Amino acid sequence: MPASDEWRASWDPRYQPCVPVVSLKGEAVDLSLVEVFRWADRLSIISCATPGEGCALIEYLLALCFASKTFPSSDPEWVAWVTQERTLDNVADWLADQSAADWDLFHPEQPLGQNSKLRQQFDEDGVGPSQLVLEQVGDYVQLFDHHHLEHSDNRIPAAVAFRAMLTQHVYGLAGRARISGKTLGSKLTNLSAGRLQGRIRVVVQGRTVGDTLRLNLYPPAGGEAGHFNQSWTTGRNQPRRGFKAKPPGRPTSGPADLHSYLGRSVLLRPAPAAEGEPVFVDRVLIGAGELLALDPGRDLEDAVFKDMLNGHRKPLWPSPTRALWREAHALYTAATRETSGLFGRLRHLTFPYEGGGPPCSLWAVGLIANKTVAAAWTEGHFPYAPSQGEALCEASRHGSEIAEYVARALERAAYAAWKVAYPNPKPADRKAQMARFDARREFWPAAKEPFLLLLDTTARGGDVPLALRDYAGELCSSAEESLRNRLHALQPNDKGMLARARAEQRFQADMADAKAPAELREEMQR
């Protein structure tokens, strides 16, 4: 399709600042893809606006490593890469040697990460760039509010659009796109869920960006990296999803394909700009993307599997009601017991770092959605040291059990207060009435920091039984304070005083009960 004046701009992420990073000196700066690989061991972290965007960028950087054949060929070689801090200059060199046409975000025929076939529908169905941003898009259809879709005055920088596009490819939600299916086929309007939507992605974070990339690289099955997904119209040896009918998912050709797959059929239009001015995106169009048939043994390197009641195993998933730190024991159990994949390799790693502190952390990221609408990101950073694997597994499991027990005790205390305060309640009112006295809502957020301190102490080689006792004491004190604050809602009369006394007695009895964790019983005896 011939180029039009609307797509005359060019923007190349290899040389344009598009990756927000923090240096080892604490300086925040945006770097190009080539610069990130050149200076990977002088950078501390990739620091994006959301966890999902950061995770999507790491996926893309890993895909570039595999595409440039910069990866270990075996587990022993992976260990050597990590411990010897193998340079990633090869990736930068490979990127620099690529054709500029292949890396142009606004190329008329093969725009990077996009589908130029959408251009024939762009004038009719293109919308404002907010539809590209996962946290702003709503349900993609936006029947209730079109203002940010129909107007392009809220244009966004090309670098922001590039990162948002990567996030859509990886985390895009299932649903029905707003685009019409008149020309390309009705199946274009059906959005498939992104590869990481619905499960927790675990990234091992090292002390530098270089460490992080090396830790998350792995030997490909069969030694083949597969192809890199440049755009919808390149790499035709790998058929893309068609729009006339919904095809079955395709198997991946290797990790370069897996980490760069095009989960959305998307097209971006640059805003008019004078020469030398920054490039912005003012209009986008989004439709269905590729469908993958994932191989659990090859394509789920980082997955933390949980046993289901029906006997099947399912990767750990994000929960709207259960904070991710409460599932830390699942990560540490995988790191202790798995014999293959990411966790299997981590078990046998000896870090050469000096200066104390855990050599790396397990960064877990997930997207919580309300059907087809993104609700919130959930994440957790959990310190990890291979030499302390068993201790971390014990501390996280027992620490979670203590927190769960204290929370149940608070619920029972709330019930004791409710029984006195509302002797003749209507069944429909019970939930709201008990909520007045239930301190769990304050307890769970307050329990997070003590739990993470417990893990940090353990990862540094601290005494686990002693750390658990300190942790239990802090949780008990925090719960007692939260309960007292809730009971202040009671009237200062005989009924109110009795309800308060019953609730406090119930809580104290549960803390001293024979079924309570030993650390809580010891706390009550002090």
Image: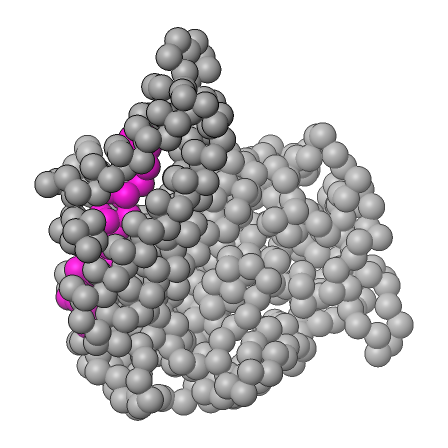
Residue at 27%, 37% (x, y): give it: 507
| Residue 489 is at least partly visible in this image | yes
Tell me the quarter of the image containing the C terminus.
Answer: bottom left
Q: Is residue 97 visible?
A: no
- Image location (x, y in percent) of residue 518: 13, 51
Residue at position x 31%, y 90% in the image: 354
**Residue 335 placement: quadrant:** bottom left
Residue 483 vs 71, above or below: the answer is above
Residue furthest out toward the left:
514
Is 400 within the magenta?
Answer: yes
- In front: 518, or 140? 518
Residue that sits furthest to the right in the current view: 274
Q: In the picture shown, does residue 19 fall above or below 313?
A: below
Question: Dividing the picture into quarters, in which one does residue 276 lie?
Answer: bottom right
Q: Position of residue 10 (x, y in %)?
A: 74, 71
The kind of secondary structure the magenta stretch mainly shows is helix
Q: Which residues are magenta?
A: 388-414
Q: Is residue 64 left or right of residue 244?
A: left
Per the image, is 389 magenta? yes
Residue 323 vertical placement versus 423 (above, below) = below
Question: Which image quadrant: the N terminus?
Answer: bottom right
Q: Is residue 401 left or right of residue 356?
A: left
Q: Residue at x 56, y 76 (%)?
A: 21
Where does residue 469 sit, x and y in percent of width and height? 21, 60
